[in-house]
Amino acid sequence: MTDITKGAIAPPRSFLSQDAVQLFYRLLAAFLICAVLAVLSDSFLTLGNILNVLRQASLTFFIASGLTLVVLTAGLDLSVGANVALSACIAGTVIHTTGSPALGILTGLACGGLVGLINGVMVTALRIPSFIATYGMLWVLNGLTYWYMAGETLHGFPAGFRQIGSGYLFGLPIPVYLLLVFLGIGTFFAQRTVWGQEIYAIGANPVAARLSGIPVARRLLLVYAVSGTMAGLASIIFLSRLNSAEADIGESLTLPAIAAVLIGGTSLFGGVGTVFGTFIGALILTLVLNGMNLLSVSANWQPLVTGIIVILAVWLDMKTRRRAQ
Amino acid sequence: MSDALPIEVTAPTPLLELRGISKEFPGVKALDDVSFAVYPGEVHMLLGENGAGKSSLMKVLCGAYRADAGEFYYNGAPVAISSTADAQKLGIAVIFQEFSLVPHLDIAQNIFLGREPKGRIPGTIDRRRILADARRVLDTIGFDIDPATTVDKLGVAQQQMVEIAKAISQNARILVMDEPTAALSDRETELLFALIGRLKADGVSIVYISHRMAEVFALGDRITVLRDGRRIDGVRPADVTPDQLVRMMVGRNVDMTYPRHFADKPGEVLLEVKGLSASTGISDINIEVRRGEIVGLCGLVGSGRSEVARAIFGADPVTSGEIIFDGKSMSGEPDLAARRGIALIPESRKSEGLALLRSVSDNLVVSALKKLFPSGLFDQRSAQRAADGLIRQLRIATPSARQTVGLLSGGNQQKVVIGKWLAAGSKLFIFDEPTRGIDIGAKSEIFALIDRLVADGAAALMISSEQVEICHVCDRAYVMREGRIAGHLTRNELTEENIVRLGMHHA
């Protein structure tokens, strides 16, 4: 067997990359779910419901998009939900005390980004596995938030600020515009920048990446900071949408975000995945939950269904990938 | 079929005979009507380039693969080998390059793993007996070590001895060894050869896979050459020359002398290392490399050669000393070294050199991203164009730049690792065992490439355990011993004897 025949036995790579094929199947799955729901429920295909799904999906997506970058480097950020809660409470306080939504937004983003940066320092300088570092951070942030809020609820924000989460522009919710913007930025960053390529290289083999001259520690710092900043952004949307902030708002956010990343086809082993996939993942997750609501399935079943979808999606990915190898 | 039968009969019946073995994988015939016989107490060398079918044949022998067609005979009687258990019952044991030892268990536990003598209390191990049994097995192979030593404290050679002891304890009659000397020093190799001689005398047959011509002739009683999944010939070492063997392996003439155009006068100093020490065990290293030179870095495995390479590249922290590159002092991480123009082609290309699941193109441009895309904006198409250029220049055999790099052969993977530094425009190339696990054809291509690089004004620092290669290719060489530079050999002094003399421990 010469080198040339050895190459020729590999499955022919069509003009579509592995990523594109997997995205195609995901879009197909999303359409199928929509078709089934449209048949089963009259209220699914109404404008109000569809906009509702998109808005819901956008909240998951903001957190999950930053997380996608972390997962691409074979890391994990378990602190995103807790980060949302702390950032929301601090941003809310700033708006209440200064009366300036702009200052509040900046504080929220900065708080989220700072938390992410600390995660990055723990992972790079202290060499703590990201899973453990961010798990510890989750508790630290929860503790800080509970201590800071002391059982209080922040309530009532300026009408202009509330527009961010619940307002409409040309008939579409504002979070949907934000979703499109960040989907574009995220995809561009991952696919069309040198830094994005380096992030894929780090995830695929961190040792080889370092020995290829990629500044691995600096890129990881960036990735965790971005993940934190996106949690900060999500905190602003939440604050604006709920018109209130409590210490426990982050508790149900982290696991769905991870689910969206995994359903979206990003591998926990790093190096494989796309931000667009994560968007589809968030969409599939939201569609299924929305459909269950419309069909009056008890909410108790939702975690079970989410779990099954995650396992199924990852299993199918691994199967197609193994075949491609 | 006359070709398929053993060419000469040294004993009435072979211990094990395979006839007409075929094994097909989707799209490729790994073994095509291969016949192979092992006689008692012989060393049977198995030769072939990477991908010739050596590993497949070995896996069929030990029951890891089931042959699609073919027959097995043991002492002349037909048998079936359809599982590893079958092979074990027939006394076939394989020593792979990657050992299958449990690092935190001791030698005795590893030898008798899964077959431990039971203690009086159910579920316990009879500690005294397992140690005594292990001692006995170690004595038979002449390995003097405390069987209670945990395996993670052992060097590669010692771990290999434990593997052999394990095989012997299972009454192995046929020992299959896959490139057993690849990671051994010369002295360790001698010890292994002595052991193989003793095993032979006891009637144990050895099937020995090797890429090293010298040991094929030093050790082999019989040689089987495979190419493209077929048995090309079976010969005795006395009847062939190395050149003839190489021709059989590659099916064409290959120049065994490595091409090298020595420069009359080396260029200016590119790298100067002064009194370098690192926590990895190297101390007071002084090295100088000039443009146009290939400088060898020799010594035994474990003498600190790779550690010097890593310290220069910034991969390990330096505790004292200075690295001056291109006239400027340098200290920092690998990204700084890479930016300044140093390239490291690491020893283990699969784990340290490549992202195996990514494409050839991705791997080729990874070190040149900043250079190719100074704006910071990446473009897949121009990346692939750059990759296509390198694929042509280096003659990398791949169907396209989009091919997953892990699917290429070892030689082509190595070219990709070198190619990424060509793309980056590196000036100093540090090669750590650049020809490990690469077949002969690809080897001379790699050396021709290194020769071209330095002719164009780059420089190379080359680590190799193959002293022949160092002697043929290098302008001069440093020899290391126990973390220090033991000596320097100029072109005229550069002989295998001198390398060995300087590198030996004088304990």
Image (tube, coloured by chain):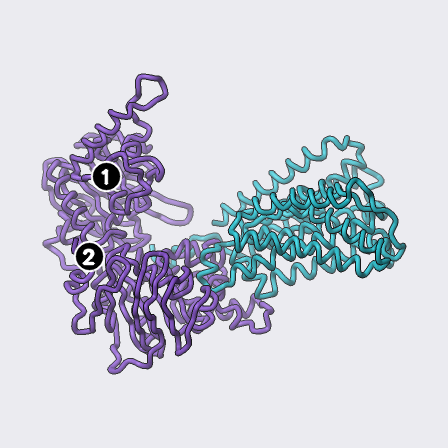
Chain colours: A cyan, B purple
**Quarter holding residue B422:** bottom left
Q: Is residue A64 left or right of residue B459?
A: right
Crowding around mark 1 (Cα neighbors within 10 Å: few <14, some 14 to 19, many 20+) is: many
| Residue B158, horizontal then vertical, whole percent | 25, 44
- In this view of the protein, can residue A255 be seen by the observer? yes
- In front of the other: B335 or A197: B335
Give me the chain letter of mark 2.
B
Crowding around mark 2 (Cα neighbors within 10 Å: few <14, some 14 to 19, many 20+) is: some
| Residue B328, horizontal then vertical, whole percent | 42, 76
Q: Quadrant of the N terminus of chain B?
A: top left
Return the mark for residue B44. none
**Quarter holding residue B272:** bottom left
At x 31% / y 77%, what residue is drawn?
Answer: B292
- The residue tagged 2 is B213
Amino acid type for the residue under numbered disc 1? Ile
Amino acid type for the residue under numbered disc 2? Met
- In front of the other: B244 or A52: A52
Viewer-nearest of discs 1 and 2: 1
Give me the chain letter of mark 1.
B
Q: Rounded to the nearest whole Å, what is the CA distance between mark 1 and mark 2?
A: 23 Å
Q: Is residue A179 above or below residue B19?
A: below
Asked whether the residues under the numbered discs 1 and 2 touch, taking CB atoms below 8 Å apart as contact, a structural biologist would say no
Q: Is residue B377 above or below residue B143?
A: below
Q: Is residue A323 left or right of residue B473?
A: right
- The residue tagged 1 is B164
- In front of the other: B396 or A101: A101
Sequence-first disc among 1 and 2: 1
| Residue B244, horizontal then vertical, whole percent | 17, 60
| Tag 2 secondary structure | helix
**Quarter holding residue B200:** top left
